[in-house]
Image: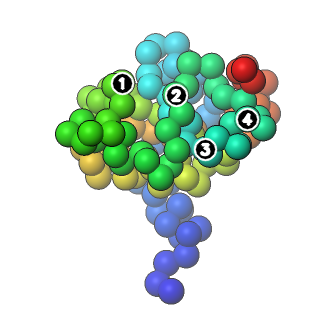
Amino acid sequence: MKKKAADMVAEAKSNIENLDPDQVAKELEAGALVVDLRDSEEIKATGMIPGAIHVSRGLLEFRADPTHPYHVEGFDPGRRTILHCASGGRSALGAQTLKEMGYENVAHLEGGITAWTEAGKPVDKG
C-alpha cells in the first residue's frame, strides 16, 4: 500500500483551507454553501448544521459537476463552498477533490460536526 487513508487526509488538509466552527458560522451567514457529506444514518443520530445541504460523500463529484445529470442546484465552482463530515477526514478529501474540479473558493470544517457541536453551535435535529 503506497498511501494510507490518514496520509491522504493529511495531504489534503495541507492543500485546502481549514476552518473552525466560528469561521463556518460567519461564512454560512454570508451565503456560503455548506455541504454535509455524512451518511443519512449519521445525520439522523446527530442532526445537521442549520442551512446546510446533505450530499453523501459518494455522490459529491456528480452533484458538484454542473455538466452531470445528477448535478444539484446551488453547487457552483465560483460560489464559496464549505464541506463537513463527522470529524474532518471525508470533508478534507472532498474539498481537495472539488479544487481539482475547478472550485476556487472551497474549504472544510476542521473537526466536522463534532467540533461544531462542541463549540456550542446550533444543530437542527428535525
| Closest to the observer, 53 or 9 | 53
* Amino acid of disc 2: Ile
Who's the residue at 71% across and 43% down the image? 42
* Amino acid of disc 3: Arg
Which mark is on residue 74?
1
| Closest to the observer, 98 or 10 | 98
**Would you say 18 lies left or right of 112 here?**
left
In terms of sequence position, does the residue under pointer 3 or pointer 4 come before the other? Answer: 3
Between marks 1 and 3, how big is the CA–CA gap? Answer: 18 Å
| Closest to the observer, 36 or 32 | 36
Between marks 3 and 2, how big is the CA–CA gap? Answer: 11 Å
* Neighbours of disc 3 within 10 Å: few (<14), some (14-19), many (20+): many
Q: Which residue is mark 3?
A: 38
Q: Quadrant of residue 73?
A: top left
In terms of sequence position, does the residue under pointer 3 or pointer 2 come before the other? Answer: 3
| Closest to the observer, 100 or 126 | 126
Local SS, label 1: loop
Residue 115 in view in this figure: no
Q: Quadrant of residue 38?
A: top right
In terms of sequence position, does the residue under pointer 1 or pointer 4 come before the other? Answer: 4
Local SS, label 4: helix
Classify 121 as above or below 12.
above
* Neighbours of disc 2 within 10 Å: few (<14), some (14-19), many (20+): some
Between marks 3 and 4, how big is the CA–CA gap? Answer: 10 Å
Pointers 2 and 1 in contact (CB under 8 A)? yes
Local SS, label 2: strand
Between marks 2 and 4, how big is the CA–CA gap? Answer: 14 Å
Local SS, label 3: loop
